[in-house]
């Protein structure tokens, strides 16, 4: 026994469960049919952990003597009773004396010889937690038989833990486990019994267990996302789906992945992971980044890709957003065995012809090798042809917004990156035709300094507010108070900012490009030609007409109904179900 680990929080259900552990010794002598029937399989021992890591299954070490003390104390606090079964005569009883809540101690010899009698004793005692300490393969065989014969019990295997516990409450000094020297401590204390296990057997295991990861997969086990236990696929109620996005920042792909994780799949939990952190995002209180920043060397890049491979291994579905995430997922799919390879959904937020050259080549390779199971285009404007993939437009995120404010304090508002495709300069030029009107720019980018200079040259610098990046909550408040939300882009995919504008009931004024058709064709936005500052100004002035505002309100309601959160969520969940359905 050693210092407590964090208790495993298993649910209490009428169905019994079995949790067992493997080390290199027990894996060599294991009854794999019994192991395959366990609900959870942990990895106990640095050597087996190393072997699995070399085989592509990076697992966090756990063990009975590390985990069981915390588990049993937690179960005792819950008012549950415990049985110790195993060890030589008197060993289970001596171990039980060190734990509150143990009401039955049965030795591992005569006590288990008659299985029916053992079941009767356990049932009569009313225990709901059973610890079996008798070594492999016997303990695994008995564990799965007891699970079939008893209802509502948790069964844990413990190997030689009873002997250690009976010898001393703290068999291992805390520093021994911290330094991973438990094997050496045991060897020094039990040299006759354990000399072969820690000298010869590792060499045998290196050969005979070279495919142990594949053996676990063949048992129907996959590594849980917390990397602590292998679990059965059929014990997971929801599909195991993760999303991969290129970088953590404030942008459309990140917003969509947040919405899918938190709104569309609140029960399924399609967690979002990022290849690296670019500038952060207040949408994600807990950012899951594979690298702290963009990899600056081949070594850092390979480390990030290895983490991605481990994340993907054994998943049911990986949803990859944006070009570099799609390319990285394709590359790591190629490195996985078919049995480990998840279904891949490529989500295109840009037209494919605009992908960087390297990403485009890897994407084409993935298409040729049939490593992409489905393609999603967030707008008809980025779909190459009508027969390619499916279009799932982004939703109007009404759940994140309150009622629209009546006061208009911000006047004209643009929420966009300061880059060439956004054409923010058109709105600055339009101020020359809109005396007395002000423009607030939320965001920044490579053209910020140029836009500041343009405002000075046009003589409107006192009417342009460069607000910089703002938290999402503040942006929503600004939208609710604005006279109009303007998006003068030269090209887009499906701008989330317009969906947020629809949610906030702010009048929309947009450039006439295909990506804006979902609002303009529904009558939810006024339109002007790309780079036409005078046309933009005319559209803004027309907002003063009551008939125009009423028409826009009707169009906004139509967009809200067509792109409602429940409707779009159903499309995403149906897509996942469809690609997982047997063919």
Image (cartoon, helix red, strand yellow):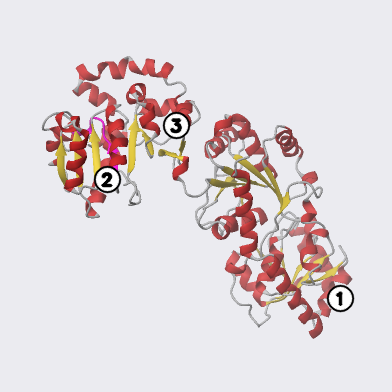
Which residue is identified by label 1?
538
Few, some or many C-alpha atoms within 10 Å of disc 3 (few <14, some 14-19, many ≥20)?
A: some
* Circle 2 or circle 3, nearest the eye: 3
Q: Earlier in the sequence, mark 1 or mark 3?
A: 3
Q: Quadrant of the N terminus?
A: top left
In front: mark 2 or mark 1?
2
At horizontal 29% and vertical 19% (from top left) the residue drawn is: 197
Residue 141, x across and y down, in percent: 30, 31
Viewer-proximal residue among 208 and 175: 208
**Along the polypeptide, which appears first: circle 2 or circle 1?**
2
Residue 291 is left or right of residue 417, and the answer is left
Mark 2–mark 1 Cα distance, whole angstroms, equals 70 Å
Secondary structure category for the residue under label 2: helix
Decide: is 326 above or below 269: above
- Whether the residues at callouts 1 and 3 have beta carbons within 8 Å, the answer is no
Q: Is residue 270 left or right of residue 444?
A: left
In the image as oriented, which residue stretches furthest toward the front? 116
Residue 74 shown left or right of residue 543 in the figure: left
Residue 173 percent across, percent down from the top left: 22, 34
Numbered disc total: 3
Q: Which residue is mark 3?
A: 219
Q: Secondary structure at mark 1?
A: helix
Q: Position of residue 210 (x, y in %)?
A: 46, 21
The range drawn in magenta is 154-162
The tag earlier along the polypeptide, 2 or 3, is 2
Image point 33% across, 51% down: which residue? 14
The label shown at residue 497 is: none
In depth, the one of 217 and 328 nearer the eye is: 217
Marks 2/3: CA–CA distance: 28 Å
The secondary element bearing badge 3 is classed as loop
Q: Is residue 288 left or right of residue 449?
A: left
- Can residue 171 be seen here? The reply is no
């Amino acid at each position: 026994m050693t210092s407590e680990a964090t208790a495993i929080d298993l649910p209490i259900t009428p169905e019994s469960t079995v949790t067992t552990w493997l080390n290199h010794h027990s894996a060599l002598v294991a009854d794999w049919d019994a192991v395959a029937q366990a609900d959870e399989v942990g990895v106990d021992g640095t050597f087996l952990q190393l072997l699995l890591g070399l085989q592509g299954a990076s697992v966090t070490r756990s063990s009975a003597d590390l985990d069981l003390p915390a588990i049993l104390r937690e179960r005792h606090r819950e008012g549950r009773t415990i049985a110790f079964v195993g060890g030589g005569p008197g060993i289970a009883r001596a171990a039980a004396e060190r734990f509150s809540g143990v009401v039955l101690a049965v030795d591992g010899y005569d006590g288990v010889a008659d299985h029916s009698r053992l079941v009767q004793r356990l049932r009569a005692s009313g225990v709901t937690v059973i610890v079996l300490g008798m070594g492999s393969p016997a303990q695994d065989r008995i564990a799965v038989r007891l699970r079939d014969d008893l209802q509502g019990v948790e069964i844990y295997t413990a190997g030689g833990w009873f002997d250690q516990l009976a010898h001393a409450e703290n068999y291992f000094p805390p520093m021994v486990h911290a330094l991973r020297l438990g094997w050496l401590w045991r060897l020094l204390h039990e040299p006759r019994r354990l000399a072969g296990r820690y000298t010869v057997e590792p060499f045998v295991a290196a050969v005979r267990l070279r495919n142990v990861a594949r053996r676990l997969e063949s048992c129907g086990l996959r590594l849980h996302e917390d990397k602590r236990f292998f679990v059965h696929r059929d014990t997971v109620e929801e599909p195991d789906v993760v999303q991969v996005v290129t970088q953590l920042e404030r942008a459309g792909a990140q917003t969509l992945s947040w919405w899918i994780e938190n709104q569309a799949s609140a029960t399924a939990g399609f967690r979002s992971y990022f290849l690296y952190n670019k500038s952060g995002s207040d949408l994600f209180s807990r950012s899951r980044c594979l690298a702290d920043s963009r990899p600056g060397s081949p070594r850092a890049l390979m480390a990030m890709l290895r983490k991605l491979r481990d994340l993907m291994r054994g998943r049911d579905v990986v949803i990859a957003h944006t070009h570099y995430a799609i390319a990285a997922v394709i590359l790591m799919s190629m490195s996985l065995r078919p049995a480990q390879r998840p279904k891949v959904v490529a989500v295109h937020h840009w037209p494919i012809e605009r992908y960087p050259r390297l990403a485009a080549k890897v994407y084409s390779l993935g298409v040729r090798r049939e490593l992409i199971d489905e393609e999603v285009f967030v707008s008809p404007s980025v779909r190459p042809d009508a027969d390619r993939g499916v279009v799932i437009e982004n939703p109007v995120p009404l759940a994140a917004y309150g009622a629209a404010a009546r006061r208009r304090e911000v006047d004209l508002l643009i929420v966009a990156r300061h880059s060439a495709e956004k054409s923010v300069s058109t709105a600055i030029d339009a101020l020359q035709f809109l005396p007395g009107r002000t423009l607030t720019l939320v965001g920044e980018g490579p053209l910020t300094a140029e836009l500041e200079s343009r405002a000075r040259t046009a003589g409107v610098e006192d009417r342009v507010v460069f607000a910089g990046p703002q938290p999402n909550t503040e942006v929503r408040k600004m939208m609710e108070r604005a006279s109009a939300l303007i998006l003068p882009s030269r090209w887009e995919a499906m701008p989330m900012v317009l969906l947020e504008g629809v949610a906030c009931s702010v009048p929309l004024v947009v450039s006439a490009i295909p990506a804006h058709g979902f609002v303009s064709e529904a009558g939810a936005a006024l339109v002007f030609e790309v780079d036409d500052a005078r046309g933009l100004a005319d559209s803004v002035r027309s907002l003063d007409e009551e008939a125009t505002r009423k028409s826009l309100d009707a169009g906004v309601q139509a967009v809200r109904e067509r792109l409602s959160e429940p409707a779009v969520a159903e499309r995403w969940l149906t897509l996942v179900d469809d690609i997982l359905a047997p063919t």
